[in-house]
């Protein structure tokens, strides 16, 4: 019986990877720069060089069930990354095949947000849930939808792009997609920064700790949070505005799939109640009566550094 799986999370900047046992314990993990190798085969080769000694340490290939990969624009059906905007490798990349050929292990791939949902279902706060949605609030807004215990993939493998749904028609331009008013334009860490800059511009006479930071490079979601907990009015308004938009969007998602819970994950959740309270208030205010006070809105219990590896590894444990 295979005792271990490899989980790989490919991000726009870093790739995190590790060896995971059947209980969800990460026995070894490391990271490498995603876009440093110019060619995707060089990337696969470098990753193999880092993992090969650990594979041998844990009993060799026969002791591993496979390798699971979460990646931007990853297609579960085809095992390909397709036109990922934040990766060097352009077009359609047969990544699962490249991993299989190099590692001589069964390989499965899906998009990074679906991998996070898998991790929550196997190891996190959604362990006993069959109906839930994960929303990742990071540089972008990712999502994974689980209905009847299965990830919703759609006919082509790309279902569940809730971050690109339009929540403010004609609103803020999303530079990556060219679409105006998407959830990601407002409820991501990037969106928080944009909102802060807009509010500072609209209220030029209002004092704010944020004015001590350079707009070009120092205003981030983290600095907005740091100013908000010091009582800064504009910084707090940024989180209220962000929560309002996120809550409205979550209400729409609830009306669609009636989940037991919505699990929030990612860097923006470090703001705690600053983001949770206005989000929950807006969500409940925009639900019809049969859905009110039914859906739990909770933060992920998984360690952020571990969750991506666990989620990717869960792909190969799943029957």
Image (cartoon, rainbow, N blue to C red):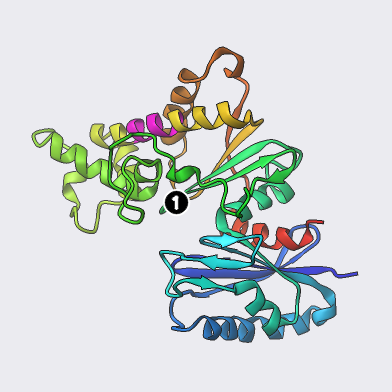
The image shows residue 56 at horizontal and vertical percentages of: 77, 84
**Camera-side residue: 92 or 59?**
92
Q: Position of residue 222 (x, y in %)?
A: 35, 49
Q: Is residue 258 left or right of residue 3?
A: left
Toward the right, the furthest residue is: 1
* Residue occupying image coordinates x 75% and y 77%: 105
* As drawn, 154 above or below 101: above
In this view, the residue in front, 24 or 61, is 61
* Residue located 45% across and 23% down the image: 281
Report x, y in % for residue 158.
Answer: 56, 53
Say whether residue 141 is left or right of residue 16.
left
Q: Is residue 245 magenta?
A: yes
Residue holding disc 1: 138
Identify the magenta region.
Answer: 239-247
Look at the magenta stretch and give its main secondary structure: helix
Name the quadrant of the C terminus.
bottom right
What residue appears at the point 57 percent right and 17 percent down from the top-left corner? 292
The part of the image, by quadrant, that contains residue 7 is: bottom right
Q: Residues within 10 Å of mark 1 (few under 14, many from 20)?
A: some
Magenta span contains residue 39: no
- Helix, strand or loop at disc 1? loop
Which residue corresponds to the image point at 39% horizontal and 34% vertical from the top-left? 167
In this orientation, which residue lies closer to the viewer: 58 or 38?
Answer: 38
Is 153 drawn above or below residue 71 in the view shown? above
**Residue positioned most to the front:** 155
Q: Is residue 177 left or right of residue 312?
A: left
Q: Residue furthest top?
A: 289
Q: Quadrant of the N terminus?
A: bottom right
Percent x, y of residue 174: 32, 49
Q: Residue furthest left?
A: 205
Answer above or below: position of 298 versus 97.
above
- 95 relative position to 174: left or right: right
């Amino acid at each position: 019986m295979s005792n271990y799986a490899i989980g790989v999370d490919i991000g726009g900047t870093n790739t995190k990877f590790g060896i995971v046992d059947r209980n969800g314990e990460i026995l070894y993990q490391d990271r490498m720069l995603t876009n440093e190798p110019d060619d995707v085969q060089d990337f696969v080769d470098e990753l193999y060089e880092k993992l090969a000694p650990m594979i041998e340490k844990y009993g060799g290939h026969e002791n591993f069930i496979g390798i699971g990969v979460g990646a931007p624009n990853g297609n579960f059906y085809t095992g390909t990354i397709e036109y990922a905007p934040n990766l060097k490798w352009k077009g359609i990349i047969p990544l699962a095949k490249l991993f299989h050929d190099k590692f001589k292990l069964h390989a499965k791939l899906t998009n990074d947000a679906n991998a996070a949902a898998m991790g929550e279902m196997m190891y996190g706060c959604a362990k006993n849930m069959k109906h839930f949605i994960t929303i990742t609030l990071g540089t972008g807004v990712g999502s994974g939808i689980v209905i009847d215990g299965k990830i919703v993939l759609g006919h082509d493998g790309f279902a569940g792009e809730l971050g690109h749904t339009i929540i403010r028609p004609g609103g803020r331009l999303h530079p990556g997609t060219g679409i105006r008013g998407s959830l990601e334009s407002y409820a991501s860490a990037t969106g928080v920064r944009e909102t802060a800059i807009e509010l500072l511009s609209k209220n030029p006479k209002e004092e704010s700790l944020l004015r001590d930071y350079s707009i070009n490079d120092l205003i981030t979601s983290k600095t907005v949070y740091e100013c908000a907990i010091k009582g800064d009015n504009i910084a707090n308004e940024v989180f209220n505005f962000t929560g309002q938009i996120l809550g409205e969007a979550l209400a729409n998602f609830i009306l669609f799939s009636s989940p037991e819970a919505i699990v929030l994950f990612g860097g923006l959740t470090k703001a705690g109640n600053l983001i949770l309270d206005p989000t929950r208030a807006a969500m409940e205010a925009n639900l019809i009566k049969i859905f009110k006070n039914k859906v739990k809105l909770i933060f992920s219990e998984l360690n952020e550094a571990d969750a991506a590896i666990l989620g990717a590894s869960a792909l190969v444990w799943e029957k």
